[in-house]
Image: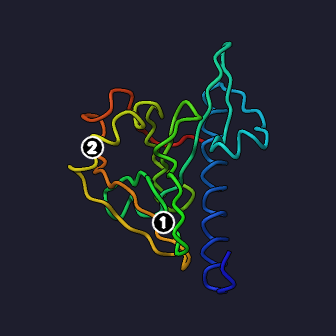
Amino acid sequence: MSSNPNHWNHFEDDCNRGKRGESAWGRHLTAQGYVCSPIDLEEDKRGIDIRATKDELTLTFDVKNDGMAAKTGNLAFEFISRYNDGRTKDGWATKAACDFFVILEDLGDGRFNYHAVRASEVVAKLPEMMPDYRVGICRKDPNKETSSLLIKKHLMPHLFESYVTGAVKS
């Protein structure tokens, strides 16, 4: 962790944005009749943010609150982080511990659109998509750069059979 106070502010902002997104998605699922239950530390480490059950069906979600999607029209699928010391870490879009990735498009005023896709489908298709789509690089953290595949929202239904979208209801 950097001792740079600006980095800490970005980290705190990102964590708070993530928690707001997870809360909104949890309320949305509850409004749809799901019962959300707490996740344990091991699930959290694997990228699972929410577990929800309805009619004997339990689903898990990795929720991303994307602050740029509404402005750019892109959804960002993080595939690698490269640290200044030479280490690398696979991004969330390269592994599927959860059932669904949910990217929330923050519209402001507590309103969100959701973009949900089966995690296993993203993991399977991401490598073959890499040459055809733009890569965005984020350097907010002075100790690493994170690369994400940027996919236009309007292309999602054509690329992913499991893709669904709509307004978050809470």
Q: Find residue 125 and report its image quarter.
A: top left
**Which quadrant would the C terminus be assigned to in this image?**
top right
Q: Nearer the viewer, residue 85 or 27?
A: 85
Q: Find residue 163 and report its image quarter.
A: top left
Above or below, 125 relative to 54: below
Element type at mark 1? strand
Residue on which disc 1 sits:
82
Element type at mark 2? helix
Above or below, 155 relative to 74: above
User: Where is residue 97 drawn, in percent x and y?
Assistant: 59, 35
User: Where is residue 36 drawn, in percent x and y?
Assistant: 72, 32
Q: Nearer the viewer, residue 139 or 157?
A: 139
In space, the residues marked 2 and 1 are separated at their CA atoms by 20 Å
Q: Kindly identify the amino acid type of the residue bearing the numbered disc 1.
A: Arg
Q: Kindly identify the amino acid type of the residue bearing the numbered disc 2.
A: Met
Residue on which disc 2 sits:
129
**Which residue is painted at 66% across and 19% down in the image?**
54
